[in-house]
Image (cartoon, rainbow, N blue to C red):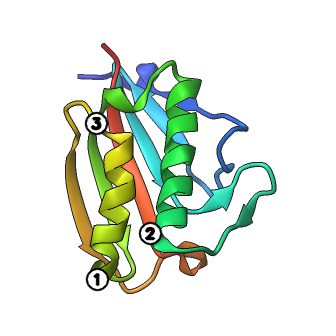
Amino acid sequence: MAHAQEKKVIATPDAPPAIGPYSQAIRAGKTVYLAGQVSIDPKTKQFVNGTIEEQTKMALDNLKAVLAADGLTMDHVVSTGVFLKDLNEFGKMNGVYGTYFKNAPPARATVEVARLPLDARVEISAIAVHP
């Protein structure tokens, strides 16, 4: 069990900064808890309204950048949470998602939600573990 003093904030300018009282990620022991990411371009810090495929790619690229800031890759992800504005877009999201998790894909929960920040179509969070 991780102790409070082991809690470390993970942050990178290569992903959108936290807007509010949360961190891009927190490491507790060997486990890294990543905040949900939406389609925000880390360079411009602007929301990019695009297709579900474009938004999924940007959300996953943002997660990938936060993982890299702690020396991890997508292969270290053990669980994800996918929040969709329209579950009818699941197949399109899943097509992009699958290109990021080829080896031993993580456990996943996918739910449809009434609304997401910035009226995004998708938000994805993750949990990763250091070897």
Mark 3–mark 1 CB contact (< 8 Å): no
Which is nearer the N-term, disc 3 or disc 1? Answer: 1
Name the residue that disc number 3 marks: 102
Q: Is residue 26 visible?
A: yes
Residue at the image point whose x is 64% and y is 52% from the top: 18
Name the residue that disc number 2 marks: 122
Residue at the image point whose x is 54% and y is 64% from the top: 54
Q: Nearer the viewer, mark 3 or mark 2?
A: 3
Indicate the position of residue 5 as horizontal and vertical percent values. 45, 20
Quarter location, residue 117: bottom right
Residue at the image point whose x is 36% and y is 53% from the top: 97
Neighbourhood count class around disc 1 (C-alpha, 10 Å): few under 14, some 14–19, many 20 upward: few
Indicate the position of residue 21 as horizontal and vertical percent values. 60, 55
Quarter location, residue 130: top left
Pick whichever, 20 or 43, lies toward us.
43
Indicate the position of residue 55 as horizontal and vertical percent values. 53, 65
Secondary-structure class at tag 3: loop
Q: Tell me if 21 is positioned left or right of 46 in this view.
A: left
Name the residue that disc number 1 marks: 88
Give, as a three-letter code, the residue at label 2.
Val
Q: Tell me if 103 is positioned left or right of 70 in this view.
A: left
Which is nearer the N-term, disc 3 or disc 2? Answer: 3
Secondary-structure class at tag 1: helix
**Image quarter in which the N terminus is found:** top left
